């Protein structure tokens, strides 16, 4: 269904969409919009994307997934990966699922273990297909994520930004280095910025790319 949506939107600018409801706030929003009585953990019914939109933004786990008989990534113009290193990802999941969903630490670890084959075989390979990756790396000890007492803050992190092909989007590294204080290059295609500058880095990097994409569409 996701591949069909991406293909349809690329050809006609429309297609069928649905939303996964993560929280009570999202449930309230979509129930008011659709006249439904849905709860967190459910999908909204399919509905049509209205005509006249400029671009399709997908945020989820399968935007670049490919495998036997399917290839979502072939329809994507700009693939962006946003991911912490795995230990930090687990810390965040344990804290989030406990705080927002009331799950015990043991239940969350069971979920992580159960999903590991999908994580290895379907989730992580997508980050090799992205155009740009933003990976948060903590500068504090996260060696045992299952006993962590807090989530490292942005100021306790760096963000590693990897460009698969800088030439594709005419990436100007000297300009980025001048705009992002305390940033540096770790490889010819990799920029490192302080964790607290991640939002600014995304804005400075992505705004001209998206602007050019929309301009070329017209």
Image (tube, grey):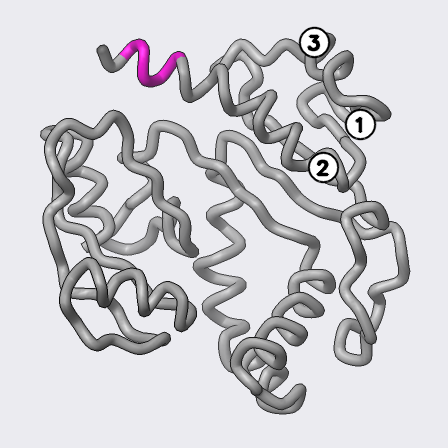
Query: Image quarter for residue 164?
Result: top right
**Magenta residues, start to end:** 212-216
- Position of residue 152 in the picture relative to residue 30 (left or right): right
**Numbered disc 3: secondary structure:** helix
Q: Does the magenta segment cover residue 215?
A: yes
Which residue is at the far right? Answer: 140
Taking depth in this image into account, of 170 and 181 the one nearest to the observer is 181
* Residue 103 pos. (x, y %): 57, 87
Look at mark 3 in the image and give the residue it sits on: 175
The Cα–Cα distance between marks 3 and 2, rounded to whole angstroms, is: 17 Å
- Position of residue 93 in the picture relative to residue 31 (left or right): right
Residue 186's mark? 1
Residue 166's mark? none
Residue 160's mark? 2
Q: Image quadrant for the N terminus? A: bottom left
- Position of residue 82 in the picture relative to residue 141 (left or right): left
Query: Image quarter for residue 152?
Result: bottom right
Which residue is at the far front? Answer: 32
Q: Does the magenta segment cover residue 154?
A: no
Q: Main secondary structure of the magenta part?
A: helix
**Numbered disc 2: secondary structure:** strand
- Position of residue 75 in the picture relative to residue 184 (left or right): left
Could you tell me which residue is drawn at 42 percent across and 21 percent down? 210
């Amino acid at each position: 269904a996701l591949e069909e949506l991406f293909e349809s939107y690329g050809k006609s600018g429309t297609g069928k969409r649905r939303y996964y409801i993560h929280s009570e706030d999202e449930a309230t929003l979509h129930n008011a919009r659709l006249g439904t009585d849905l709860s967190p953990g459910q999908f909204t019914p399919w509905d049509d994307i209205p005509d006249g939109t400029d671009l399709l933004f997908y945020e989820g786990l399968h935007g670049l997934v490919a495998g036997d008989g399917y290839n979502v990534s072939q329809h994507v113009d700009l693939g962006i990966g946003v991911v912490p290193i795995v230990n930090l990802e687990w810390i965040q999941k344990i804290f989030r699922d406990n705080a927002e969903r009331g799950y015990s630490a043991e239940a969350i670890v069971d979920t992580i273990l159960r999903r590991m084959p999908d994580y290895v075989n379907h989730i992580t390979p997508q980050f090799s297909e992205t155009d740009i990756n933003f990976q948060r790396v903590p500068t504090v000890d996260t060696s045992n994520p299952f006993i962590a007492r807090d989530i490292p803050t942005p100021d306790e992190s760096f963000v590693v930004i990897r460009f698969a092909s800088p030439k594709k989007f005419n990436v100007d590294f000297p300009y980025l280095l001048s705009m992002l204080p305390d940033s540096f290059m770790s490889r010819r295609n990799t920029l490192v910025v302080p964790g607290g500058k991640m939002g600014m880095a995304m804005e400075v990097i992505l705004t001209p790319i998206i602007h050019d994409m929309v301009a070329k569409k017209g």
